[in-house]
Amino acid sequence: MTDLQKRFHEIIAPVIEFEYETEIIEGKGSWVTAADGKQYLDFACGIATTNMGHRPDAVVAAAQAQLNKLWHAGGAYMYEPIVEAAEKIVEIAPDGIDKVLFMNSGAEAVEASVKLARKVSARQGIITFRGGFHGRTMGSVTYTTSKAKYREGYHPLLPSTFVTPFPHPFGWGMTQEEANAYALRELDFTFRHEVTPGEVAAFLVEPMQGEGGYYPASHEFVHALRAIADEHGILIIADEVQTGFGRTGDWFTSQVYDVRPDILVMGKAIANGLPLSAVGASAELFDAWPSGSHGSTFGGNPVSCAASSANVDALREVVPGVNGLSGHAFSRWNELKERHRTIGDVRGLGLMIGIDLVTRDNEPDTEAFASIGRHAHKAGMFILNCGPAGNIIRFIPPLNVSMEDLDRGIDILADAIRAYED
Ligand SMILES: Cc1ncc(COP(=O)(O)O)c(C=O)c1O
C-alpha cells in the first residue's frame, strides 16, 4: 500500500466507492498521469463529465480569469457570468427552454425540477421509470431505481412516486417494439390501478438510461410518452444530466429524438467537471414559480458559470464530429460482438455506448467486467461499468478523443475480452 492509499483509507469515508486505487496527479485531454509516471487513457471521463477531456485550454483560461475577478456571489447581487452561461445554454437547448436555474449537482437539479413541476401544476404524483438514476439525496434517491442497493436502509422514501418499466429490450429478451409496447401497457396499468393521470405532475425520465444500463429510450417510446403527457397535462422532466452536452450525438438526447421536454435537467459535462448543474424550462413555467420558493448558496457559481460558457463554445467545434466517431466505434464493437460470445449486446447513442457482458447462459456476467476492468487498468486505461449487475462496460471516451486514442481504447478492451475468454 502506498503512503497516499494508507492516508486515504484512514481519513476518507468509505461510503463513496473509488473504482481504482491509483493516485492520479494530472490530466490533459484523454490522458491522466499517475504518481509513478504511468499514463492512462481516461475513458471513465469523471462519469461522463469531462466531455472535452481534461483541462481544455479555453475552459482553463475562462475559469482562471474569473477566479481573479469574483468567485462567489451567493444570491446577493447580479454578475455577468451567470447570464452569459444561461444564454449559451438556451441557445443550444431544445426549443421551448428559455430560462435557466443553476444549482451545483445533478441530484439538486433533479430535486429542483420536481419542486418546480409540483408547484406549478399543483399536482403531487411523480412517475419514474425502473432502472432510472437521478441522484443520491433523499428526494432524488426516491426516483432512483437503477440499483436497489442505492435505496437500501434509507426507507421511508418520499410518497406519491410511482415506478413503471422503462424499455429494456436486451434484458427482457424482446425486440424494441415489444419492449416499448410492454412498458406503455404497464404505464396504462399504473394510471388504472395506482394514480389517475390528473394527479400526476410529471414523468421524470432519462431519454437514454445511464446508470441503469445504457438503454436508449427509442424514438417511438419518447414520442408515445409525449403524447400521453399532452393528453393529461403532465409535464415531462428530461433528466439529461448524463446524456447532455453532446454525449449522445446532438447537444441533448431530446434533440436526437426530436421530442420536446417541458423541463430539462443538466449537470455533469455542463462545465466539464467544475461543479454546476441547471434546470431549463419555458418562461411560462419558471415565471409561475414564486420568487424565493427555492434557493441555493453556491448554485450558479461565477467560476463554474464562466467555465460553462467557454465549455459550450469549445463543444460547438466538437459536437458535430461525435456521430462520425460514434459510427466508427459502433462498427468496431459490432465486429467484436460477432467474435466474442461474452459481448451480448452493443447499444447506445453517440459516444455513450454500453457493452453488455453475458455468461454462456446469456445472464449478466459481473465477473467479466471485473476481469476486463483489471486488464484494462494494467494496460493503462480507466473504464467504468453500469447496470444493476455491474456487467455493462460504459464506453464513454471524451468527445474530442483522437481517432487513434479511440482505436487504442477499443484495442485494449478487445484484448481484455480475449484474455477473459481464454
Ligand atoms: C441521469 C442522472 N441524473 C442525476 C445524476 C446525479 O448527479 P450528481 O451525482 O451530480 O448529483 C446522475 C449522476 O450520475 C445521472 O446520471
Image (cartoon, rainbow, N blue to C red):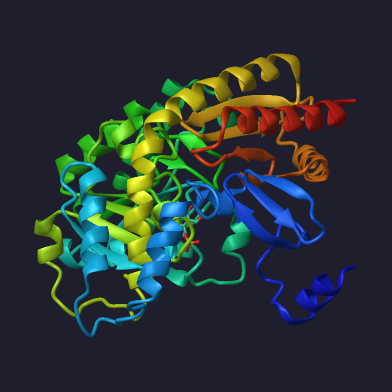
Q: How many marks?
A: 0
Q: Is residue 287 above or below residue 256?
A: below
Q: Determine whether, in the image, residue 370 is placed left or right of residue 149.
A: right
Quadrant in which the C terminus is drawn: top right
> Does residue 224 appear in the picture of this structure?
yes
User: Which residue is pictured at 36% across the width and 58% down the height?
Assistant: 308
Q: Determine whether, in the image, residue 306 is placed left or right of residue 137.
A: left
Measuring from the top left, give residue 222's x and y in whole percent: 32, 34
Q: Is residue 81 above or below residue 377?
A: below
Quadrant in which the N terminus is drawn: bottom right
Q: Is residue 192 above or below residue 302?
A: above
> Does residue 108 appear in the picture of this structure?
no
Q: Determine whether, in the image, residue 235 is placed left or right of residue 46.
A: left
Kindly indicate the quadrant of the structure image that contains residue 94.
top left
User: Which residue is pictured at 54% across the width and 45% down the height?
Assistant: 212
Q: Is residue 219 above or below residue 397?
A: above
Measuring from the top left, give residue 128's x and y in whole percent: 39, 51
User: Which residue is pictured at 53% across the width and 38% down the height?
Assistant: 214
Measuring from the top left, give residue 61's x and y in whole percent: 42, 60
User: Which residue is pictured at 23% across the width and 85% down the height?
Assistant: 76
Q: In the displayed image of the protein, which residue is found farthest to the bottom?
A: 76
Front-most of residues 281 and 165: 281
Front-most of residues 46 and 259: 46
Measuring from the top left, give residue 296's x and y in whole percent: 32, 78
Q: Determine whether, in the image, residue 416 is placed left or right of residue 12.
A: right
Front-most of residues 252 and 56: 56
Kindly indicate the quadrant of the structure image that contains residue 267.
bottom left
